[in-house]
Amino acid sequence: MSKDNQNKETQHQDAQHKDAQEMKPDDLGIKPNGINPEGQETMPDGLNPDDLGIKPDNLNPDDLGMEAEDLLLSWPEKYAALEAKYNDLNDQFLRKAADFDNYRKRMGRERQELVEFANQSLLSDLLPVIDDFERAIKSTESSKDFNSFYEGIGMIEKVLISQLESKWGLKRFDSEGEVFDPNRHEAVQMEKSPDITEARVKAEFQKGYTLRDRVIRYAKVMVQVPEE
């Protein structure tokens, strides 16, 4: 072989070696993810495990809205289980509804009794006063002493007013000589006077009362007003 031929053969081998070094796996139809470092094949791109009939190992029945044991039941068994659960919940609902209805009726009765007997304590406190009046009246049958009867009635009044004020917060107020106050006084008569500069109560016909500082009855009065 001539020297020229030897040189051509050497150049041809060098070119083949270089091409082999630059060759990529894709040139042979092999994708990089088809082989892992341990030499085991992996799933090619675009291939779904379901296409091979493979089920995932971590399939959760809850993802399907089912209990784990329900997956093992037939449709009649599932229907029977659901019907039993419905009956149980419906029974609980009916019991709760009945309990609430009984509670509502009981509260209604208690509220009605509270209204009907709200004044029981007050009336119980008035009973001794009634007894005192009965004794005072009976005393006049054996004695015609008016002064003693008058004093006894006065004492009963004081006891009654004191008890209502101390225990129940009921107070009566005096109005005669006071400045006229439309929030406390009801004018039933009126007269003009040159001696005053503002309206005043000249006479009191009926006393007024407050219950814990709230006026529950206006005093009926005669009012004097300045002359114009």
Image (cartoon, helix red, strand yellow):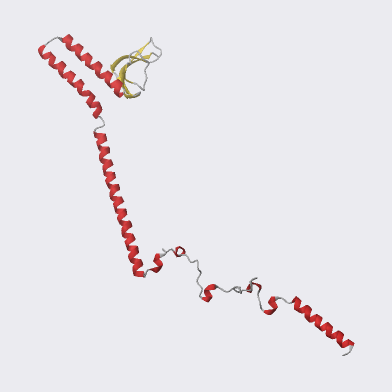
Residue located farthest toward the front when viewing the structure as drawn = 38
In the displayed structure, does residue 22 sit left or right of residue 114?
Answer: right
> In this rendering, is residue 96 above or below 26?
above
Residue located farthest toward the right when viewing the structure as drawn = 3
Which percent across, then down, holds residue 39?
64, 73
In the displayed structure, does residue 89 sit left or right of residue 11?
Answer: left
Q: Quick one: quadrant of the C terminus?
A: top left
Could you tell me if residue 189 is visible in this image? no
Residue sitting at 35 percent across and 63 percent down?
82
Which percent across, then down, holds residue 136?
16, 16
Q: Observer-nearest residue: 178 or 69? A: 69
Residue sitting at 39 percent across and 68 percent down?
72
Q: Quadrant of residue 131?
A: top left
Which percent across, then down, holds residue 209?
31, 21
Could you tell me if residue 16 is visible in this image? yes
Q: Observer-nearest residue: 211 or 177? A: 211
